[in-house]
Image (tube, rainbow, N blue to C red):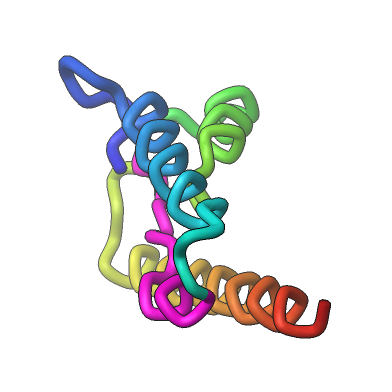
Amino acid sequence: MDINMPIMNGIDSTKGICKIQDEFYNNPAISEIEKIKCPRAPILAMTAFSNKKTVAQCKQAGMIGVLYKPISKKGFEEEVEKTLDIEFLRYVSARLKNKCK
């Protein structure tokens, strides 16, 4: 997600996506099986700014990683692999916690 998009920036877009996902996952009418079939969309920030404030804003909005421009193929692949592994582990952990209650 590019954080400097025109009209709606990536921070606001991510907050909107996360809000919709939260409504889905917090809806008691939706079964656990349906929730498992629809994992959360992992969102990576893409920015030319590498300062701590920008990174904090991205994380606070719900992004799970940050890519810095210019982006290399290797850097992109490493961040996606690391981020998806982390996101997958969080997802499985949350599902297991709910099943064990």
Whether 85 is drawn above or below 13: the answer is below
Q: Is residue 48 visible?
A: no
Magenta highlight on residue 38:
yes
Left or right position of 77 against 26:
left
Left or right position of 89 against 8:
right
Instruction: Pick whichever, 41 or 9, lies toward us.
Output: 41
Instruction: Pick whichever, 97 or 78, lies toward us.
Output: 97
Instruction: Pick whichever, 82 or 95, lies toward us.
Output: 95
- Which residue is located at x 17 percent, y 15 percent? 7
Image quadrant assignment for residue 81: bottom left
- Which residue is located at x 26 percent, y 68 percent? 73
Q: Position of residue 100 (x, y in %)?
A: 80, 84
Left or right position of 94 against 86:
right
Whether 16 is drawn above or below 53: the answer is below
Q: Is residue 97 visible?
A: yes
Magenta highlight on residue 18:
no
Most extreme residue toward the left, as rendered?
6
Whether 25 is drawn above or below 100: the answer is above
The residue segment tinted magenta is: 32-47
Q: Position of residue 16 (x, y in %)?
A: 37, 33
Whether 24 is drawn above or below 3: the answer is below
- Which residue is located at x 28 percent, y 45 percent? 70
Image quarter of the N terminus: top left
Most extreme residue toward the right, as rendered?
101
